[in-house]
Amino acid sequence: MCTLEDVQRANLALLCEVDRICRKHGVTYFMDSGTLLGAVRHQGSIPWDDDVDIAMFPDEFQRFAAVASQEFSQGFSLSIPSDYGDDVFYDYIPHVIYEDSQVRDEDAKARFYQGYLNHIMLDIFIIEDAPEAKWQRKIQQLKLKFLYGLGWSRRYRLDYSDYTGPQKIGVWLLSHIGRLFSQRTVENAYWRTARAFQGTGSRFCFMSNYILNEIDCVYHKEWFAQAVDIDYEGYPLMAPVGYHEVLTTLFGDYLQLPPPEDQRPMHYDFSNPNFRVG
């Protein structure tokens, strides 16, 4: 049986491995989401959190990806969505995988995703330029949500219980329309849309591969103008210089703890006897 402490130990190893490679090659990353919140509010992992996230600008991610396979210590690897092939889609998030782990049963779903998603992983979000005008941002966000929805046609299975009545209709339509196109075509269109405003001198940016209910979140690029070190479980890890503004945008009063009922792990089923960390 795996414990939350086991997962947090693996998550810390993932962060330190990425940090080691990035510093060696002069690559900038930023702790993001709950990982950044944990660093600022708890000087480490949020006590009940079970995953880790970072963000990179596209050119920094490409530099990291170019050296990762040669630099990773044994037991770590990088997966990107295109690794799954042209008939499989889960999301657009690259992952650093902690290989000596298993988070769910080796069942048909795990085999469908070729084992990539059956490990403890670090998520990498990509920071893209957002358009200056709000109306352009809204159009871009709608296009990205539409293209993401087309990918649902290549999920292992859709759980319609996650959606309300009108949402169920939209999910059903998009998942069927998506079958008219190859996943590679949809993926290429997604990234063209996400990067449509690169190099325009915009003052704004967004995480182009956030989950759908967070992709509307817009930041000022100056908040990511440089990285600063923040202590995370005794290790100096990179954070955006405007971490206060980033966290406020994401969480509001981020120093306020959530209610007790929300202080629980969100990503893994700790009751699964096959959940293990080596």
Image (spheres, rainbow, N blue to C red):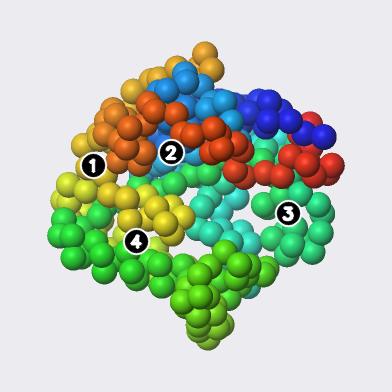
Q: What amino acid does circle 4 point to?
A: Ala
- Which residue occupies 26% across, 69% down? 139
Label located before the other in sequence (3 or 2): 2
For the residue pair 183 and 154, the one nearer the viewer reads as 154
Q: Amino acid at mark 2?
A: Ser
Q: Which residue is mark 2?
A: 33
Gap between marks 4 and 1 measured at Cα:
16 Å
Q: Secondary structure at mark 4?
A: helix
- Placement of the N terminus among the 4 image quadrants: top right
Disc 1 marks which residue? Answer: 221
* Snapshot quadrant of residue 115: bottom right
Q: Which residue is mark 3?
A: 115
Question: Which label lies toward us, 3 or 2?
Answer: 2
Q: Position of residue 210 (x, y in %)?
A: 43, 52
Q: Is residue 194 above or below residue 171?
A: above
Q: Residue at left 54%, top 32%?
A: 260
Residue 47 location in percent, x, y?
57, 26
Distance of label 1 from label 3 (alpha carbons): 36 Å
Q: Earlier in the sequence, mark 2 or mark 1?
A: 2
Distance from disc 2 to disc 1, alpha carbons, whole Å, reads 16 Å
